[in-house]
Amino acid sequence: MAKIVDFKCTFQNSVGINENVTKSLDLKFPDAYMKRESMVEIAKAIKEYDEATFCELPFCHTVEAEAMGGIVNYGDEKAGPRAKEYICTKPEEILGLKEIDFNSGRIFEVLEACKILREQGEDVVLEVAGPFTIMNVLIDTVYVFKAMRKKPDLMKEVFWKLGNEVLKIIEEAVNRGVTMISYADSSGGVNILGPKMAEQVVELFTYEYLNKMQEITGDRALILLCPKTTLSLIGTEKAEFVDIELPSSMRYGEACSYLVGKEKFVGQMCIKNIKYELKNGICKAVHLK
């Protein structure tokens, strides 16, 4: 029987945008969250503040949902973009949401910011969200959990509706030179869903979805899994850790950069834990079975 262990998030580095970063920049908010030039400036400032080896975009988990019609409060320099109001009252309505237009809106600005950063010689991590995190912007989770219990086939359709749009984002990003994709769905962790439902999500969606994701990234980009996702895969025997020897001891982020083109997935630590040291010179790749 599957046993999914939860990963306790304990990192202390920048989540979204740190106010200590934004107050030092001459930017107007919330406009800064919506324009590529500002995104580039903020991303580079966060990289310097965190002493990271890469830039991360975007600065919130609302971009995907907004690109499909979700309503977002853009916030200010203290509080970044977040859900404003739900546009769906039942999961079926998610299936009717529009496809993403990659030629306009904030998603286009994010992708173009990634391209600019790469042209400036920066390593870029594009963060993408899983279905539960995206649905947090679109619909009250009460309806989601009810449908999970009573209409699992419907929820599988919903997962893939959202997931296929994110796969398009990933392809657009990789085509712009992004070499690392960070995938997380903390709103769908075992601590929230419970063991039975968490296993169900892996079976209905996550395992096959990640296989499709790696078909898109190929050797061009490394997929950084949230440890919650990693442990769900391992707990359901859909994946395993494989020790990869590094040239020396290094930080996790540095190891990820080193493994681009050499491995498909890593996921032993949150990429936000910038200063996590792999002192033994071993990084654990994640191999799907």
Image (cartoon, rainbow, N blue to C red):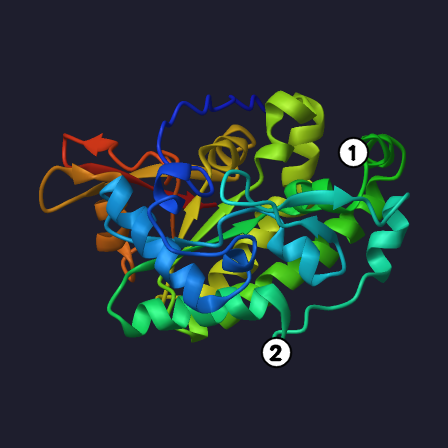
Residue 143 locus on image (x, y percent):
86, 35
Q: Quadrant of residue 55?
A: bottom left
| Nearer-the-camera pick, 88 or 282 | 88
Q: Position of residue 217 (x, y in %)?
A: 44, 65
Circles 1 and 2 in contact, beta carbons < 8 Å: no
Q: Which quadrant would the N terminus be assigned to in this image?
A: top right
Amino acid under label 1? Thr
Of residue 197 and residue 237, the one placed in the foreground of this image is: 197
268 on left or right of 199: left
Camera sees residue 243: no
Q: Nearer the viewer, residue 259 or 35?
A: 35
Q: Residue furthest bottom?
A: 103
> Residue at coordinates 82% horizontally, 53% vertically from top-left?
94
Report the amino acid beneath label 2. Answer: Asn
Going by the image, does 264 lie left or right of 200? left
Mark 1 or mark 2: which comes first in sequence?
2
* Residue 9 - label: none
Task: Answer with the quarter of the image where residue 236 lies.
Answer: top right
**Is 173 placed above or below 188 here?**
below
Q: In the image, what residue occupies the spot 56% across and 60% down?
A: 212
Q: Residue at x 27, y 63 (%)?
A: 122
Task: Name the residue nearer the viewer: 209 or 135.
Answer: 135
Residue topped by disc 2? 103
Visible residue check, residue 247: yes
| Residue matched to label 1 | 141
Q: Position of residue 186 (x, y in %)?
A: 57, 34
Around disc 2, counting alpha carbons within 10 Å, would you say few (fewer than 14), some (14 to 19), or many (20 or more)? Answer: few
Dot in front, 1 or 2:
2
Secondary structure of residue under mark 2:
loop
